[in-house]
Image (cartoon, rainbow, N blue to C red):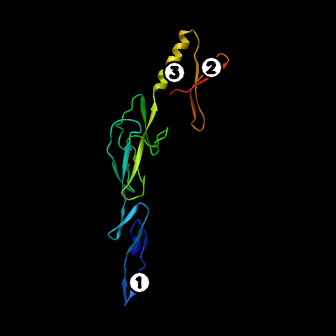
Amino acid sequence: NCSNSSNVSSWNTPSWSNNAMSNLCSISGCNTGYHLSSNSCAANTYSIAYNSNGGSGSMSNTSCTYGSNCTLRSNSFSRTNYTFLGWSTSSSATSATYSNGVNVSNLTSTNNGSVTLYAVWKQIVHNYVVSEIIKSYYNSGKKADLYYYRDIDKKEIDLVMLDGDCIVFVEVK
């Protein structure tokens, strides 16, 4: 029975000729993530490349097999005045999709394909700038009335300051 093999999407239809069946159990297609190899469906392999996305250093690729867990490497990139948040498939991401060392699977179904994960960084100068503003308020004898704002779409204002009757918005770069 040809239909007992896993990861096969279609079979060639057997035909009768001179009372004998031909094309017995011939595979004509495999499921997504698998390719035809010696009349069976084999899992595709792919690699994960790591991009420093503004950082420095280098990292080796990770080899993966479709249908199996694959462990991401831990970040070895560095970037001055930034902290590493994780990995994303987008170079412009502000939040990470994947953390260091997590198991992932099926990032691409393309045989011998490649997926690039970009380091996601968060600038750490915010703390320094905010602490300097707080010090300037206290040194002038004023109370520092400071807030942070982020809306549901993750748009943010780094610092919202109440100064008397005024509201001051500060974006730290």
Image point 36% across, 33% down: which residue? 78
Which kind of residue does numbered mark 1 sit on?
A: Ser
Q: Quadrant of the N terminus?
A: bottom left
Q: How far apart are marks 3 and 2 (CA)?
A: 14 Å
Residue 21: x and y in percent read 37, 84
**Circle 2 — which element?**
strand
Amino acid carrying label 2: it is Leu
Q: What residue type is labelled 3?
A: Val
Between disc 3 and disc 2, whose residue precedes? Answer: 3
Secondary structure under the numbered disc 3 in the rendered image: helix
In the shown orientation, is residue 56 left or right of residue 121? left
Hey, which residue is sitting farthest bottom in the picture?
Answer: 18
Q: Which mark is residue 130?
A: 3
Label 2 Cα neighbours within 10 Å, binned few <14 / some 14-19 / many ≥20: some
Between 18 and 172, the residue placed more toward the observer is 172
Q: Residue at x 52, y 26 (%)?
A: 172
Identified at 41% across, 65% down, the residue is 7
Query: Between tags 1 and 2, which lies in front?
Result: 2
Mark 1 to mark 2 CA distance (whole Å): 83 Å
Q: Residue 15 carries which label?
A: 1
Of marks 3 and 1, which one's residue comes earlier in the chain?
A: 1
Q: Depth check: 172 or 86 in front? A: 172
Q: Quadrant of residue 156?
A: top right
Please name the residue that numbered disc 2 is placed on. 162
For residue 5, above or below residue 127: below
Query: Mark 3: few, some, or many residues within 10 Å (few <14, many ≥20)?
Result: some
